[in-house]
Image (spheres, rainbow, N blue to C red):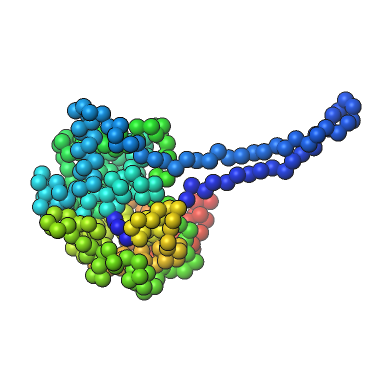
């Protein structure tokens, strides 16, 4: 697991026979078909189209920062030393370009946007700094610094063909159906040992670059992994992510893990120790917390344990009843 389908339906109506009102003669049957247009999964623009100009240089630098964050901002970073040594592309695969690999395709088109987690309108700068503070367990960048401007330029270039306000197919992380039971860390441990530890290690600490500047395969827990406020600390995010992307090298068309295995390995990994981070302003409206947000308080009577591991169906059902 290295850091770390749209459903296409074609509805064909039955053929209908039309009759002439003028001569009562039966006309040849005319098939009437109602089809839904296949939603093409987003593909990143070719890097060869980045212009050879100052703007292009900025885009290329932004891509480099996403792909090799630790080289510039890690514990031995050449620009600053303010992150845990992971790279942004450990969570946003292939420098944020892989379909269903938590890509950046819809970022430029959908920001600024309201997010319930903060209870406010958020900018792209806020999104980037949240990743640095949570997934990279580090410090935010100044909004005016060269590195932030480069990252934003790269994200804008990636989303250049996405209509404003639209989220393309293949964006983000796919949502898996909830299990009818709680996710099981012990079953997940078996999945981890079979599918994951060859890259991330039996101790979950990943594999470092030879020069120790960053990770070839990132740590999934421990002091240099993502903290408890990161998006992947929610089981639904982790499960959807690994289903379409892990073990490293597969994609959403060649998935190896069953849904249950994805949920269980998510439970195992997120049961291991990692940096603890408290963002006290998160979820100002308690009722807007996601079903699998692992920390209370909650607007319902379900336990923190159930909110973390499930089963999530009863929580979802109660939320629907409260809405209606």
> Is residue 273 placed above or below 41 in the rendered structure?
below
Specify the quadrant of the image occupied by residue 10: top right
Specify the quadrant of the image occupied by residue 183: bottom left
Is 49 or 178 nearer to us in this picture?
A: 49
Residue 234 appears in the rendering: no
State the image coordinates of residue 141 (x, y, percent, origin top left): 17, 43
Identify the residue at image location x=39%, y=73%: 187
Identify the residue at image location x=23%, y=70%: 203
Instruction: Name the quarter where the N terminus is drawn.
Output: bottom left
Residue lying furthest front: 48
Is 262 or 281 nearer to us in this picture?
A: 262
Identify the residue at image location x=26%, y=71%: 202
Is 236 or 29 nearer to us in this picture?
A: 29
State the image coordinates of residue 153 (x, y, percent, origin top left): 25, 34
Number of marks present in the image shown: 0
In the displayed structure image, the side of residue 28 where residue 42 appears, left or right? left
Residue 24 appears in the rendering: yes
State the image coordinates of residue 205 (x, y, percent, origin top left): 22, 65
State the image coordinates of residue 28 (x, y, percent, origin top left): 80, 34
Identify the residue at image location x=30%, y=32%: 49
In the displayed structure image, the side of residue 113 where residue 77 appears, left or right? left
Residue lying furthest top: 22
């Amino acid at each position: 697991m290295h850091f770390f389908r749209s459903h296409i339906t074609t509805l064909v109506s039955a053929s209908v026979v039309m009759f002439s009102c003028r001569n009562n003669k039966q006309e040849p049957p005319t098939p009437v078909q109602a089809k839904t247009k296949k939603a093409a999964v987003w593909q990143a623009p070719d890097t060869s189209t980045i212009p050879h100009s100052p703007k292009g240089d900025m885009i290329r630098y932004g891509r480099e920062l996403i792909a090799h964050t630790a080289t510039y901002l890690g514990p031995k970073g050449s620009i600053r030393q303010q992150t845990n040594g992971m790279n942004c592309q450990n969570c946003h695969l292939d420098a944020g370009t892989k379909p269903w690999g938590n890509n950046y395709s819809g970022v430029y088109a959908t920001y600024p946007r309201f997010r319930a987690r903060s209870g406010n309108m958020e900018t792209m700068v806020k999104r980037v700094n949240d990743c640095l503070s949570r997934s990279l367990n580090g410090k935010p960048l100044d909004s005016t610094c060269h590195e932030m401007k480069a990252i934003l330029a790269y994200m804008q270039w990636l989303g250049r063909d996405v209509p404003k306000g639209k989220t393309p197919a293949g964006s983000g992380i796919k949502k898996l159906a909830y299990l009818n039971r709680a996710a099981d860390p012990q079953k997940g441990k078996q999945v981890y040992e079979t599918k994951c530890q060859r890259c991330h290690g039996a101790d979950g600490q990943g594999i470092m670059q030879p020069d120790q500047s960053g990770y070839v395969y990132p740590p999934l827990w421990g002091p240099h992994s993502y903290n408890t406020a990161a998006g992947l600390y929610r089981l639904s995010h982790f499960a959807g992510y690994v289903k379409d992307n892990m073990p490293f090298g597969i994609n959403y068309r060649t998935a190896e893990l069953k849904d249950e295995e994805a949920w269980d390995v998510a439970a195992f990994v997120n049961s291991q120790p990692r940096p603890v981070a408290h963002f006290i302003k998160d979820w100002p409206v308690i009722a807007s917390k996601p079903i699998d947000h692992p920390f209370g308080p909650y607007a319902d009577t379900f336990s923190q344990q159930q909110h973390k591991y499930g089963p999530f169906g009863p929580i979802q059902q109660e939320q629907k009843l409260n809405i209606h």
